[in-house]
DNA sequence: TATTGCTGCGCAATCCGTTGAATAAGTAGT
DNA sequence: ACTACTTATTCAACGGATTGCGCAGCAATA
């Protein structure tokens, strides 16, 4: 139940529209919490009803009108209250890992194929995270420290995943050789 | 959407009751996919309606009666079909990380306190996973390979997390020194 | 010119998941 | 004797999340 808090965190720094937030959820914060635009618009509506955020209507020409949201005092209080109490441990739901656990049913080749696809994705992510981290590091702005630490988490995560993938590959190749030579 | 498949994976090896499955979700598979007993019972009901599993009623004395579920042909087909198509990337929802991202609002000490709590949890998990992995390695049964690989994933994950936690600690300590000396 | 893609907001139906509780009987500990 | 835990299943209520759809206009590309 902390999509609301993720939104409040983002609104802390700048005023933003639902669309802006959706983009950030697809990138920066998406590393840690993801959400679709429908959820975000819905949650913004609720937050507004509860006076945690307020908005001003911006007519635009060429583009559709937009609503720029900003956090209120009440919103900031709520956020601080939330930050103080311990977070619930994240629940894990990794479909690919379920496949691995049930891997005895699949043939090695199809597992390896999907493993490679996933590895490509992870490698890509790793590079974008590293590039962003390097940029932040060069700028050396103190207030970016937490963004940097979040990125480091993502980087270490991808690296660990890729390392694991190598282990899987060597293990399955060994198995393959044993079974074909038998 | 793949709680059903996680259940089918478990039912592959042995006939089990909802209660048995719930225990396994709390341990082995819980590493990868977690679910409460309510969800499991509900899903077993649906799977039964769709003829993916069937059960026999076991009256017991001393204990409540139970239903022992087993996978059907249709269930196995469904599982294989699912294994063949690529898994959706896991959605990430880590409340603690949202806190880190919004960390500029908190004071370092409260972050460090929660970090330590989380680290304890991770270290504990790491040890149980390592112990299980060692056991499997000693037995060296070929059919346990995938359970072993799943455990390895968990181990590398915890290690990466703990490594990250160290980075956070040193970064926040540096910051603390700078701000108090200023 | 037709199609795709981006900016921007929203609704409705449905499904998934969590919380909380009820029932029922045995066993183990204080 | 009382409490707490384990085995075993199920229901009800609510809220969160996903999927699919719709509107609207501009810009750029094929």
Image (cartoon, coloured by chain):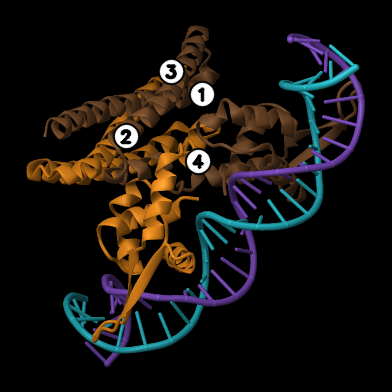
Chain colours: A orange, B brown, C purple, D cyan
Label 4 neighbour load within 10 Å: few <14, some 14-19, many 20+: many
Q: Are marks 2 and 1 on the same chain?
A: no
The residue drawn where x is 33% and y is 29% is: B112
Q: Secondary structure at mark 1?
A: helix
Q: Are marks 3 and 2 on the same chain?
A: yes
Query: x, y (%) of residue A128?
Result: 21, 46
Q: Secondary structure at mark 4?
A: loop
The tag on residue A178 is 3
Q: Secondary structure at mark 3?
A: helix
From this view, report whether residue A85 is shown above or below residue C2. above
Inter-mark Cα distance, 3 to 4? 33 Å
Label 3 or label 4, whichever comes before in sequence order: 4
Q: Are marks 1 and 3 on the same chain?
A: no
The tag on residue B147 is 1
Inter-mark Cα distance, 2 to 4? 16 Å
Residue, disc 2: A157
Towards the viewer: B78 or A33: A33
The tag on residue A93 is 4
């Amino acid at each position: 139940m902390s999509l609301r808090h993720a939104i409040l965190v983002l609104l802390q720094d700048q005023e933003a529209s639902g669309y802006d937030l959706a983009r950030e959820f697809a990138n920066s914060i998406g590393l840690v919490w993801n959400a679709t635009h429908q959820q975000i618009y819905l949650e913004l509506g609720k937050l507004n009803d509860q006076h945690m955020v307020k908005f001003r209507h911006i007519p635009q020409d060429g583009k559709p009108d937009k609503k720029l949201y900003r956090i209120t005092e009440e919103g900031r209080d709520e956020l601080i209250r939330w930050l103080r109490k311990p977070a619930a441990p994240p629940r894990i739901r990794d479909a690919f890992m379920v496949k691995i656990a049930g891997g005895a049913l699949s043939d090695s080749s199809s597992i390896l194929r999907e493993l490679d696809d996933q590895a490509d994705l992870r490698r890509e992510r790793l590079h974008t995270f590293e590039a962003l981290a390097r940029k932040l590091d060069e700028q050396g702005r103190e207030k970016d420290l937490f963004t940097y630490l979040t990125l480091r988490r993502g980087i270490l995560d991808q690296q660990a995943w890729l390392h694991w993938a190598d282990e899987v590959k060597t293990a399955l190749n060994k198995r393959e050789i044993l079974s074909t030579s038998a």
